[in-house]
């Protein structure tokens, strides 16, 4: 009888380990999803910006790598360069939310590998955006107005934080 109890206990323990391992690698644990949103959890859903006109003019736009390769990509984060990135948008729970810049930090000289940080807030959200420069215009190309970045966005709502790893461009 004791051997049978030990066997049952071992089977239950192994089953629990499998369940915990599944949860740890589940896409719902914060990894990027392509279907309808970047992150879809019970707490909040981060989706693609619905208003395709945000912003008008020069901007920073970030999306998933596969969206960036499309001819008409959808964006997860957009900020307005024309107002010095004081305004940005993120889609939360199916609604485009306007965010206001709280602070920013930029390198003195931007080069590949440089990091800059922006902190935004609005509608019960806090967004910490870190841009890592991946490409700059060639020095002699006066017509070029774009800089490319890898972006890490930490989005916090009601005590829950989700991290997005995105690709983006800033320019006109």
Image: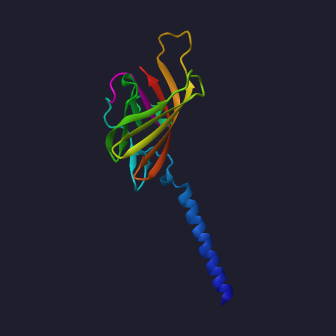
Q: Toward the viewer: 172 or 127?
A: 127
In the rendered view, tell whether residue 130 sits above or below residue 169: below
* 63, 129: nearer the viewer: 129
Q: Position of residue 25 (x, y in %)?
A: 56, 55
Outermost residue to the right: 3
- Point out the image quarter for the C terminus: top left
Count the numbered circles shown. Answer: 0
Q: Quadrant of the N terminus?
A: bottom right
Type of colouring: rainbow
Residue 3 found in image quarter: bottom right
Question: Given the current orientation, which residue lies at the most extreme front position?
Answer: 103
Query: At which x and y percent is residue 125?
Result: 38, 45
Q: Is residue 165 left or right of residue 10?
A: left
Q: Which residues are magenta?
A: 54-63
x, y percent for residue 151? 51, 35
Residue 47 shows in the view:
yes
Identify the residue shown where x is 32% and y is 40%. Answer: 96
Q: Give the residue displayed 51% in from the left and 26% down from the top.
A: 148
Identity of the residue furthest to the bottom in this view? 1
Q: Which residue sits at x=33%, y=44%?
A: 123
State whether residue 139 is above or below residue 153: above
Q: Is residue 36 visible?
A: no
In the figure, is residue 63 to the left or right of 17?
left
Residue 158 image point, x, y percent: 39, 52
Which quadrant would residue 87 be assigned to in this image? top left
- For the point 39% across and 30% down, the residue is 79
Q: Is residue 37 magenta?
A: no
């Amino acid at each position: 009888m004791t051997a049978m109890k030990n066997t049952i206990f071992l089977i239950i323990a192994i089953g629990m380990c499998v369940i915990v391992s599944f949860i740890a690698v589940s896409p719902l644990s914060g990894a990027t999803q392509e279907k309808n949103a970047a992150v879809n959890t019970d707490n909040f859903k981060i989706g693609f910006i619905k208003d395709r006109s945000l912003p008008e003019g020069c901007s920073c736009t970030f999306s998933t790598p596969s969206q960036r390769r499309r001819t008409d990509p959808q964006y997860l984060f957009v900020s307005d360069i024309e107002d010095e990135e004081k305004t940005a948008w993120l889609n939360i729970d199916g609604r485009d939310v306007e965010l206001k810049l709280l602070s920013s930090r930029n390198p003195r000289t931007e080069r590949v590998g440089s990091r800059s940080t922006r902190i935004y807030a609005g509608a019960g959200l806090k967004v910490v955006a870190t841009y890592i420069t991946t490409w700059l215009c060639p020095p002699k190309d006066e017509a070029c107005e774009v800089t490319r970045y890898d972006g890490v966005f930490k989005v916090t709502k009601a005590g829950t934080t989700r991290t997005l790893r995105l690709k983006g461009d800033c320019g006109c």
